Image (cartoon, rainbow, N blue to C red):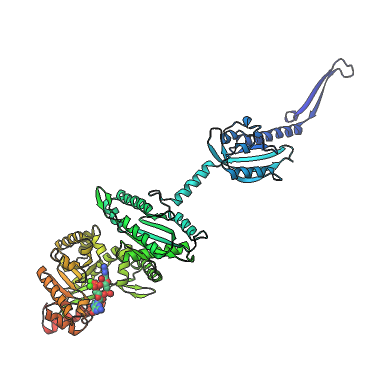
Amino acid sequence: VQTCALRSDMTARDFSDDPEVAGIVLTARDITEERAAKIGLRRSEQWFRGLVQHSSDVIAVLDVAGVFTYASPAAHDLFGITPAELQGRTFVELLDHDEQSGVSRVRSALTSNPPGIRNLEVVIRRPDGTHRTAEATLTDLRNDPSVNGLVLNIRDVTDRKQLEDDLRYQALHDDLTGLGSRLQFHHQLTEALGPTRRKGAMVAALYIDIDDFKTINDSLGHAAGDQVLVEISSRLQTRLRLHDRAARFGGDEFAVVLSDVYGEGDITGIADRILEELSLPVTLHGQAVRIGVSIGIAIDEDGTASPDDLIRAADLAMYEAKEQGKGRWAMFESSMADQTLERFELGNSLGDAIENDELMVYYQPIVDLGSGKTLGVEALVRWNHPMRGMVSPDQFIPIAEKNGLIDPLGCWVLDRAVHQVAAWRADGHDIYASVNISAVQLQREGIVTEVLEIVDAAGMDRHAVVLELTESVLIDDFDLANQRIEALREAGLRVAIDDFGTGYASLTYVDQFAADILKIDQSFVSKLENNDESAIVSTVLSIAEAMGAQTVAEGIEVPDQHRRLLALGCSFGQGYYFTRPAPAQAITETLMRELEGEALTGHAH
Ligand code: C2E
Ligand code: CA
Ligand code: CA
C-alpha cells in the first residue's frame, strides 16, 4: 500500500511454463535511499559546477608547470581568450611583462614549495593589447584527488583600482588649478624634511593668500574669481625652481615648499619674485585688475620641525603679513604664535557671547563743555567674558571685523542703544544716541536699510541717532563710504567722524564729504599743552566750522584740558573728567540728578 512512496528496482520474470510457479515473478528491492544519494551527488556536482561556471571570478586549474588544464567561462572576460584556448598555455605568458615585479612573483610562487600566493596583484595583457589588473590567489590542491592541481582564483579589479586611483588623484590634486592639494603638499613637505634632504639645505614653507579675494568674487563674479585662481597658479609654477612644489590649500590659499635653499636671503629672494610676478595685473572682463598676495614664511634649518609645525608657522606669518598691510611677506617669529592663539580663542568664544548674554552696552555722556549738561550718550560695547572678565572692545572688535561677527554684534549694540535712549527720551531726557559703526559694517550691502529698520522699530527719532564712523572708512573706499554717509544723512540720521585727525583721510578728502560731527581724538586732547597738538585741534575746529559740523572732544580727563578746549572754542566733549562709561542704570541716575538740578535752579530745558 505504500508502493507509491517507495522507489524500487523491479524485475519481472515469466514462469508461466513452470508448473510449480505458473505465473510471473516480480522481485522488488527498495532503493529509495540509494537513489536519493545518487541524485544528491549529481545535484551537488551540478551546484558546484554552476557556481564555478557563473562566477565572475575566474577559477582555473594549473599543473605544476603553471599550464592551464581547466578554466571557468569568466576567463574569457579577463584574459580575452576562451577557456578552451587557455588550455595548454601558461599563466605567466598571459601577464604583462612590462610589470616585471608581478611576473617574477608569480614565477617564484609557482616554484616555491608548496606553490601558493594570496591576493597578489598582477597585470594581464590581453591579445587586443589592453590591460586588466587582477588579484590572484593560488592554492595547492595536488593532493586532493578530485582536483589534482593548483587552483587559481583570479578576479578583475581594474575598475576598483581605477576608482582608487581617481580618488587618490582627487585627494592629491586640485581640480581647478591642477596644482597639488593640501595632502599632496604635506607629503612633499614630509619628503623635503626627510632623510634625503641635502646637506646644509634649509626647508621653507610659504603660505600664500590672495588679498581681498572676496571683493573680487563679490564684485566680478565667481567665474572671474576662478580665473584669478588659475592665473595665480600658473604664474606661481613658472616662478618656481626645479625642486620647489606649489599646492592649493583651497579657497584663495596656496603654499610652496622650497627644499633646495641655503640661506634666508635665498628664501626671501624667492618670496620677492613671487610677490612681483603675482602682482602683475590680471585681465578680467577686459579690464586689467591688480591682484595682491600676502606671504608667510617659515623655515626649518636643522630638521627639527614637523610638516605640521611648519605649515602652521607659515600660516601665522601670513596673517602677520596681512596685518602689516598686505601685499608683502612676513617671516615667522615665535611671538606670533601666542598672539594668534589668544586671538583665536577669543574669536571662537565671541560667537557665543551674544547668545550667552555676555555682551553689555555701557554709556558715556557727551556734554556741553560750557554747562556740563548731557546732550547725548555714546554706546560702548563691553564683553564680560566668563574666564577673562571684562575684555576691552579694542581687543575683540578687530577680531569681530575679521571673522564677520561685527555685523550681528554692531546691529545688536545699535538695537540696544536706540531702545535704551528712546526710553530715556520718553522719561524727559532730551539726549541723542551715538553708536559706533565699523568700516566693515558700512561696506556691507543693505546696511543703510537695516540701520533705519532698527531705529524705526525702536520708535526712536531718527534725528536723535548719531552714527560714529572712523576715518578709515574713507580711506578704504571713499566713494562707497561717502555714498552711504549721504544716504544715512538724507534719511535723517546724523553722522560723526570718529578719531578725526588720526588718519590721512581728514586732510585728503576734507572738501569732498560732509558730516554732522567731528570727534577730536583723545591723543590730541591729552597733549593740549603742546603747541603742535593745540594747533591740530584749532585746525579741526576750523574744518568743522567750514563743514557746518559740530566738534566733540574725546577723553577729557582733567580740568586743564577742559579749560583749554573751551578757550580754543570747542563746545562739546566727553571723558572721565565728566563721567566714565557705565551701565544704563548708573546713567539713569546721572540723568535724573541733572533733571532735578535743573528743576532746582529753575532752568528749563
Ligand atoms: P572710541 O569710539 O574712540 O571710544 C572712546 C573710547 O575712549 C572708549 O573706549 C571710552 O571708554 C574711552 N574713554 C572715554 N573717556 C575717556 C577718558 O577720559 N580717558 C580715557 N583714557 N579713555 C576714555 P572703549 O570703550 O574701550 O572703546 C574702545 C574702542 O572700541 C572705541 O573707541 C570704538 O572704536 C570701539 N568700540 C566700542 N564699542 C563699539 C561698538 O559697539 N561698535 C564698534 N564698531 N566699535 C566699538
Ligand atoms: Ca566712538
Ligand atoms: Ca574715538
- State the image coordinates of residue 288 (x, y, percent, origin top left): 25, 51
Q: Nearer the viewer, residue 116 or 247?
A: 247
Residue 398: tell me if it is visible.
yes
Residue closest to the far right: 20
Q: Which residue occupies the foreground of this view, 295 or 29? A: 295
Judge left or right: residue 471 versus residue 300.
Answer: left
Q: Is residue 379 left or right of residue 373?
A: right
Residue 132 image point, x, y percent: 55, 39
Residue 560, quarter of the rendered image = bottom left
Q: Nearer the viewer, residue 467 or 109?
A: 109
Q: Position of residue 365 (x, y in %)?
A: 20, 76
- Give the vertical position of 593 relative to 475 (above or below): below
Q: Is residue 580 visible?
A: no
Q: 288 left or right of 241?
A: left
| Direction from residue 62 to residue 21 in the image, left or right | right
Q: Is residue 464 above or below residue 14?
A: below
Which residue is depicted at the point 74% across and 31% down? 35
